Image: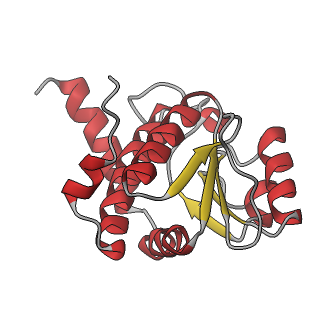
Amino acid sequence: MTTLYQAALDDLACVFERLDESAVARAVEEIACARRIALYGVGREGLQIKGFCMRLFHLGRQAAMVGDMTTPPLGTGDLLIVSAGPGDFSTVAALMGVARRDGARTLIVTAQPDAECPRVAEIVLPIPARTMADDTGPSLSVLPMGSLFEGAQYILFEVMILRLRDRLGITPEAMRANHTNLE
């Protein structure tokens, strides 16, 4: 393996060595108990959240991306999952406000758990990785800008799906049956 690949993998390994497993367990339980789930993220974080939404759908969960025409309204028993690596985005804050006003709970995935949006979320899932908010100064990763956070999101979300699959008693075959046939 070339040096850059190994350095990137080493950087990701460092993130998971510092990951708060109790926060992951709380997030998995919250998702397992939610009636409906809406998800939101911007930029490359939004791409990772979309992949997570797709896998939740494969698990048979009622999950949709905020902004899609088929996103249901959220209320009591529902969950809004947002990604805000730097901790604050105006769109994230606004969506969290609407969800909470109407009785839904909020889960935020972030690298900045002390920022404004995480302070008002019911569930905070911190990923200890560099984002665009702190990508200047001495390099903490070989990966550029917020890529360490986004790469960690991909791995974390897939592991959370495995844990949810076990928690909900969903078989790999049932997940596959929920995959689209229109590709």
Residue 116, picture quadrant: bottom right
Q: In this view, does 165 lie above or below 86?
A: below
x 46%, y 46%: residue: 52
> Picture coordinates of residue 33 (x, y %)?
54, 75
Residue 180, picture quadrant: top left
Between residue 92 and residue 5, name the one nearer to us: 92
> Picture coordinates of residue 56 (x, y %)?
44, 53
Between residue 174 and residue 4, name the one nearer to us: 174
x 60%, y 57%: residue: 37
The quadrant of the image that shows the C terminus is top left
Asked whether, in this view, residue 69 is left or right of residue 167, the answer is right
x 81%, y 70%: residue: 103
x 86%, y 56%: residue: 97
The quadrant of the image that shows the N terminus is top left
Q: Can the viewer see residue 115 in this picture?
A: no
Between residue 18 and residue 81, name the one nearer to us: 81
> Picture coordinates of residue 30 (x, y %)?
55, 72
Q: Which residue lies furthest to the left in this view?
A: 1
Asked whether, in this view, residue 162 is left or right of residue 156, the answer is left
Q: In this view, does 4 lie above or below 39?
A: above
Q: Can the viewer see residue 81 in this picture?
A: yes
Between residue 105 and residue 146, name the one nearer to us: 105
Residue 159, picture quadrant: bottom left
